Image (cartoon, helix red, strand yellow):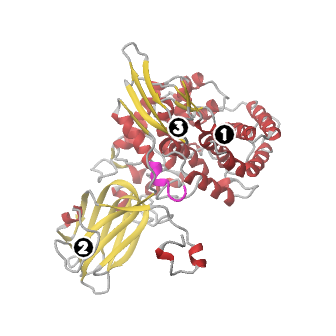
Amino acid sequence: MNDRTIFRVMDKETTDTIHPDERKSAYLLPRRIVWKQGKISNEEVLLKERESQISLAAWDDCVMDSTDGQASLLLDFGYEIHGGIRILAWKDSTDRGARVRIRFGESVMEAMSEPGGEGNATNDHARRDIRTGIGMMSMNRIGETGFRFVRIDLEEENASLSLKSIAAVLVYKDAPYLGSFSCSDPLLNRIWDVGAYTVHLNMQEYIWDGIKRDRLVWVGDMHPETLTIRTVFGADASVARSLEFIRKETPLPGWMNGMASYTMWYAIIVHDWFMYTGDLEWLRSQEEYLEGISRQLSECIDEKGKDTVTEGRFLDWPSSDRPDVVDAGVQAIHLLAADSLRKLFMALGKQGPAEECARDMERLACFPADADGSKQAAALLVLAGLRDAEEMNGSVLAEGGAEGMSTFMGYYILTARAMAGDYEGCLACIRDYWGGMLELGATTFWEDFDVKWMEGAAPIDRFPKEGETDVHGTYGDYCYKGYRHSLCHGWASGVTPWLTENVLGVRIMEPGCTKLEIKPHLGNLSWAKGTFPTPFGVVHISHKKKKDGSIESKIKAPAGVTVIS
């Protein structure tokens, strides 16, 4: 860094402590003006492309005037983004900066809401409601949160503000989309893309759960996100960076994020990431910590084989008020973590710890956990080998289609159903569940969703009509009531890797992707194609259903990758 011109005037101590931000930013114009109130002229100019630099002479300006009362605008930028806005102002009648209020919203109604009022709008984690001053000849960058809509109020009484432009500032990691997916169903293609985009927005310097709330490294949330990242972006450094961060933040015997189940997910993520990258040196850097959590988890199994962790028994939000379901789900996650640790210790040549994990798996498998009709618990029990996939699919998982789904557990529910061979049922569920969010105006996938919310609901990109429900402000529970609900949550992206793993049929068989199994399951699709990034390069895949029902596949893999079918 010291040889770069901008730092040459600084001393070495200063330049050594500068932390570069690898993210980029870009300006986006508003797509439409949703609503206005008060005295505003020439507002359509805000939709036009203009130079992002203020100048001396005002021309073709938008004027907000509060001489007859507050003037307000609501802008739609077309897509959920992470960042803020940039206001270029030519004239301010106060000569000291006119008071302006900026409200960000993931929905139209959130942008119109008051903090702490009806709908539970908040200003925590990332401020979405900001008052500031806008002066003459100024370029003002305001806010950093997740949003699609912005309301701007000129609150200064008897004032006017001459504006050149209002642009969204997209703050993002410039990561190329190496993976891809397309098939004969355009809706599934859109769903794959939106899942990828949802995680991309959450790939900042670390992997966040949500860009509005919480903007934190939640380890359980990271598992679906990590699967999406390797499917779309390959071996992005943000994964290892986030795992290293949370490991340092959680000295043993602490549980990650204060939750035992999230420490279990950590072990599963480390295994899955090692299988993808094959990076044995990185795995060795985790060895001591992995041995510590393995011992800690082993101590939390009673004589009957029941998991006994007491701190942070979390499955997902919709299951939180059903302790028996949570117990069954955590039992399964514990077994999956023990299996992941066993495989990791084998890769590290640690025979003793691997054998101890195998004994833990046997003990955990002895306890008769019951899903009690929960799709989340049933799916995890299937994945852990504790229940038969076909039996659980017939009695629980396929029941009611997309009803009873959960955004976090969606990947695991679909995977368990696929293990039962119910691919067409999975595709129908995807269309109804993730497609249901798109139908309500989503451009990223949500922290939670229930297909029952769709009945009589207005899309998030307009005001509800009489008799319609404001889906954002009305629904949600626990930490995500009303407008506090995150409409861009990375854990909802599991549908993206599921489509690649099951429709394209990609399975990692050996660490580092040295061996892949590619076995397509097209269901009612006539064709599917895409790419899958590996440490050796991108694999190109194409499947086409022939008249006799058989599938013709064309696969091009880079040197170093063996493909079996």
The label number, if any, that marks residue 333 in the structure image:
1
Q: Nearer the viewer, mark 2 or mark 1?
A: 2
* Secondary-structure class at tag 3: helix
Give the structural element (helix, strand or loop) at label 2. Answer: strand
* In the image, residue 415 lies in the stretch drawn in magenta: no
Between 249 and 10, the one lying in front of the other is: 10
Mark 3 Cα-neighbour bin, 10 Å: few <14, some 14–19, many ≥20: many
Residue 6 falls left or right of residue 132? right
Q: In the image, what residue occupies the spot 75% across and 34% down?
A: 361
Q: Secondary structure at mark 1?
A: helix
- Percent of width and height locating residue 333: 66, 39
Location of mark 3 (residue): 411
Work out how far the residue at label 3 is from the one at label 1, CA to CA, in angstroms.
Answer: 14 Å
Q: Which residue range is magenta in the image? A: 198-206
- In this picture, is 98 found above or below 79? below
Residue at 35 percent across and 29 percent down: it is 184
> Which residue, given by chain and number where applicable, does mark 2 sit on?
163
The residue under label 1 is which amino acid type?
Answer: Ile
The reply to whether residue 495 is visible in this rendering is no
Where residue 534 appears, as percent x and y from the top left, is 53, 40
